[in-house]
């Protein structure tokens, strides 16, 4: 099924759960709210025409620099092995309450990406069996991939124009 | 542990905890597995990762697009051109440019050479772990030839950064093409040599058949990809299903097996060595002439000779080197077939010359929970075989 | 004026006193240790033999972390044979090794493990920091990478490169062998063995 057909079918079957949809550079993209994500995911997996049985990727993104609400986003990428089509689902999360229900009961491949979301972004994934730090050490504080987390902890040690660089480092915005 | 009435400590389970620590010759990098063992059988395996976390994703948010390319080399460090290609394809999709034909063919040649080099390292270390040390020495002999080819065309043995936005870094020379041709002629006899040593070897069969079995449904549900998925019977190869970079012009087979044990993964990867060689042979024969990078001077550097005569070329060169490519606002994901499976970059751009979010979809990262599920119920000696057969690279797991 | 002159004279006499005393002490020490010349020749010669034995049989501990580990494996293989320099057996257990080649980037989570492995190696031990990431943090100047492994363990030889070719690592091992021979029989070699 082409991207337009997928979007049409999903909109007709799951109209109320889906905030909006688009075809972006040839890929079908759904915008879903976090309350509806589990229902939509279950429908996408079990529907015989869509048959999205392969979870490719779960990502998080922080849009602090673009100053938009909601600040965070969780992006799911699904493939279908038999039908050979894909879909991307984007779920917006607020800054005060970044929680999202887990999809690991549908695809077991979601265990690690959701744990990484908790570790690097601080999203609380409800229903995950083992939500703990995955990549950073256990006693690490902070969520490194957020935009307000600094990139370097210390200044460049050796530099020919050290005084100039000191001012530059101080006046730079946090991650750039 | 509980305390009985007499004040004695008592364990619920009579199991032994064994730590296969981050420093271990067989864990293929810094990977820690805590095994709960019942005698010699493994009850459960709990993986700990993060010992090689480099913060590449966050560092990419502070670097221009062309500076991210050498960092992508160091992710899956056994096949650097594969990562380069995934990143460049994603950014080119956002830029909505096309890449000239010759650049596509050169990219395919580099990626397939890298696939062969990566599979050679896999075979060498996997066989070494199980005990066949001769294969280790033999495989590295051929890998050195591939690294010599890398060095001839890009100057670096491993981290080539040869695939750039809009094409490739430099054109290939007739001498290099001749060297690749010679290697392609020489290689099949060597693959036969490795197969003579292992494929019908009773010790190899004993240690690898019916070990670490993963069925077809489990492999799909646990998000395995690449040779592991194909060894479980799923015919899913992104070079055939989602052709990119001109792969639809080549004729090659996708090897699959049925059982999903270690031996099948070995057979799939050795067959892939032969198919990669086929692809390189066809690419050499059909290599078109033409430009090796896109003509748009906002994306790729202008020809050095024009810098002396054209003012525009000079300005474009200055802009590209100092400021970099400005990518339109958007987000996209392009999956590519790497030696370990589906490699993809999810890139969010906010319209400037610095990416806003770069996320690598690493096949080894997604394979680790499934791998630890495979370890349950097998002997401690099989754990080493299973880790080797999934072929994890910690650089892309921890990023 | 008179007071300043007096102070100046006092300081001069004190300094001359100290100089005289030092000369006496040095003469005494010369006399005391003159017989020790024979001892020191013997220890130096034996030390040189021990140093020669140590440098020709450096056993590396497998500490391959990242990309540099692949080049270290290439060095151990048939093209750049490290066996001809004595570094053939890569011991998995640090208790049986005397050289640790830190090959690859050391992350914050791995640094305590690195220190533990280094502590488990018996003396005398040497460390080669292979690659840019181990020497200075490399291209990763961020929160996750220790900026140079010499913040955790003492390093003897730094091998630059990203990754350094096997020939560069082999040159590093040769330099380490020269360092061992240079230090052999002297107090610095004795300091390595606690």
Image: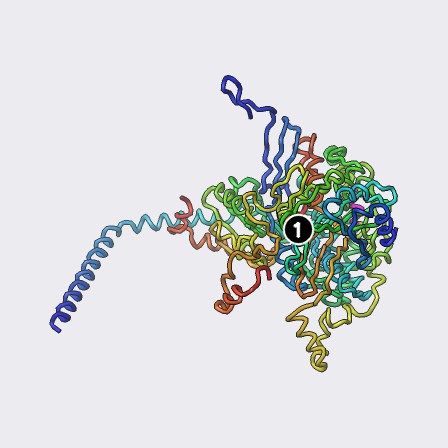
From what the image shows, is residue B156 above or below residue B388? below
Residue C173 visible in the current orientation: no
Q: Position of residue B362 (x, y in %)?
A: 70, 49
From what the image shows, is residue B176 above or below residue C65? below
Residue A100 visible in the current orientation: yes
Looking at this rendering, what residue extends furthest in the front direction? A16
Q: Is residue B325 magenta?
A: no
The residue where tag 1 is placed is A94
> Overall secondary structure of the magenta stretch?
helix
Q: Nearer the viewer, residue C2 or B382?
A: C2
Q: Position of residue C110 (x, y in %)?
A: 55, 46
Q: Position of residue B102 (x, y in %)?
A: 81, 65
Q: Is residue B271 magenta?
A: yes
Crowd around label 1: few <14 · some 14–19 · many ≥20 (10 Å): few
B99 on left or right of B359: right
> Residue at 62% across / 31% down in the picture?
B36
Looking at this rendering, what residue extends furthest in the top direction? B6
> Residue at 73% across / 67% down in the picture?
B170
Q: How many marks?
A: 1
Q: Nearer the viewer, residue A171 or B386?
A: A171
> Residue at 74% across / 58% down in the picture?
B331
> Residue at 49% across / 20% down in the picture?
B7
Q: Which residues are magenta?
A: B267-273
- Badge 1: chain ID: A
The type of colouring in the image is rainbow
Quarter of the figure with the N terminus of chain B: top right
Q: Position of residue B352 (x, y in %)?
A: 68, 65
Determine whether the residue tagged by mark 1 lies in a helix, strand or loop.
Answer: loop
Q: Nearer the viewer, residue B117 or B352?
A: B352
Q: Nearer the viewer, residue C80 or A120?
A: A120
Looking at this rendering, what residue extends furthest in the left direction? C2
């Amino acid at each position: 099924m082409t991207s337009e057909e997928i979007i049409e079918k999903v909109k007709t079957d799951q109209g109320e759960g889906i905030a909006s949809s688009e075809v972006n550079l040839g890929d079908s993209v759904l915008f879903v709210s976090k309350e509806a994500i589990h229902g939509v995911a279950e429908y996408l997996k079990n529907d015989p025409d869509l048959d999205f049985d392969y979870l490719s990727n779960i990502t998080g993104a922080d849009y602090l620099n673009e100053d938009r609400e909601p600040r965070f986003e969780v992006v799911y990428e699904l493939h279908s092995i038999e039908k050979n089509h894909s879909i991307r689902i984007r779920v917006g999360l607020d800054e005060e309450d970044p929680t999202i229900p887990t999809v690991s009961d549908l695809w077991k491949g979601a265990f690690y990406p959701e744990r990484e979301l908790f570790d690097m972004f601080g999203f609380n994934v409800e229903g995950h069996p083992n939500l703990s730090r995955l990549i950073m050490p256990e006693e690490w504080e902070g969520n490194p991939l957020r935009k307000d987390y600094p990139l370097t902890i210390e200044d460049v040690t050796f530099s020919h124009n050290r005084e100039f660089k000191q001012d530059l480092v101080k006046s730079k915005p946090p991650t750039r | 542990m509980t305390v009985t009435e007499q004040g004695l400590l008592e364990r619920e389970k009579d199991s032994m905890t064994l730590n296969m620590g981050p420093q271990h010759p067989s864990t293929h990098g810094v990977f820690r597995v805590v095994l709960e063992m019942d005698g010699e059988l493994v009850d459960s395996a709990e993986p700990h990762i993060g010992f090689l976390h480099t913060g590449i994703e966050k560092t990419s948010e502070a670097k221009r697009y062309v500076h991210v390319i050498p960092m992508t080399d160091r992710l899956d460090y056994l096949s650097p051109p594969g990562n380069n290609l995934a990143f460049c394809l994603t950014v080119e999709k956002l830029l909505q440019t096309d890449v000239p034909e010759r650049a596509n063919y050169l990219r395919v040649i580099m990626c397939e050479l890298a696939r062969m080099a990566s599979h050679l390292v896999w075979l060498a270390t996997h066989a070494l772990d199980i005990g066949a040390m001769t294969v280790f020495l033999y495989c590295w002999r051929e890998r050195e030839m591939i690294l010599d080819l890398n060095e001839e065309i890009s100057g670096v043995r491993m981290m080539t950064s040869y695939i750039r936005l809009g094409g490739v870094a430099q054109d290939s020379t007739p001498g290099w093409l001749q060297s690749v041709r010679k290697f392609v002629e020489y290689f099949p006899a060597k693959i036969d040599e490795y197969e003579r040593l292992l494929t019908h070897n009773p010790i190899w069969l004993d240690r690898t058949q019916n070990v670490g079995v993963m069925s077809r449904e489990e492999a799909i549900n646990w998000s395995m990809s690449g040779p592991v998925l194909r060894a479980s019977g799923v015919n899913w190869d992104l070079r055939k299903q989602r052709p990119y970079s001109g792969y639809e012009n080549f004729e090659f087979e996708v090897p699959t097996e049925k059982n999903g044990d270690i031996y099948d993964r070995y057979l799939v990867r050795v067959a892939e060595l032969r198919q990669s060689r086929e692809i390189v042979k066809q690419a050499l024969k059909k290599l078109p002439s033409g430009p090796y990078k896109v003509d748009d001077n906002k994306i790729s550097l202008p020809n050095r000779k024009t810098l002396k005569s054209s003012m525009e070329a000079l300005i474009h060169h200055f802009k590209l080197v100092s400021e970099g490519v400005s990518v339109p606002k958007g987000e996209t994901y392009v999956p590519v077939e790497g030696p370990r499976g589906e490699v993809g970059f999810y890139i969010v751009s906010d319209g400037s010359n610095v990416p806003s979010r770069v996320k690598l979809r690493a096949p080894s990262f997604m394979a680790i929970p499934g791998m630890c599920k495979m370890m349950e119920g097998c002997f401690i000696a099989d754990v080493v075989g299973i880790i080797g057969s999934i072929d994890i690279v910690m650089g892309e797991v921890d990023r | 004026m008179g007071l300043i002159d007096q102070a100046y004279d006092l300081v001069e006499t004190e300094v001359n006193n100290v100089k005289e005393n030092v000369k006496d002490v040095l003469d005494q020490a010369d006399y005391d240790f003159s017989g020790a010349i024979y001892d020191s020749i013997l220890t130096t010669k034996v030390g040189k033999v021990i140093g020669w034995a140590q440098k020709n049989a450096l056993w590396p501990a497998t500490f391959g972390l990242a990309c540099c580990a692949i080049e270290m494996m290439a060095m151990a293989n048939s093209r750049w044979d490290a066996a001809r320099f004595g570094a053939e057996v890569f011991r998995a257990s640090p208790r049986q090794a005397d050289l640790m080649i830190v090959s690859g980037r050391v992350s914050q989570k791995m640094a305590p493990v690195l220190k533990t492995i280094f502590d488990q190696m018996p003396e005398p031990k040497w460390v080669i920091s292979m690659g840019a990431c181990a020497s200075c943090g490399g291209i990763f100047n961020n929160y996750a990478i220790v900026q140079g492994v010499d913040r955790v363990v003492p390093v003897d030889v730094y091998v630059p490169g990203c990754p350094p070719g096997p020939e560069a690592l082999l040159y590093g091992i040769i330099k380490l062998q020269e360092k061992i021979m240079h230090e052999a029989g002297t107090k610095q070699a004795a300091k390595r063995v606690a």
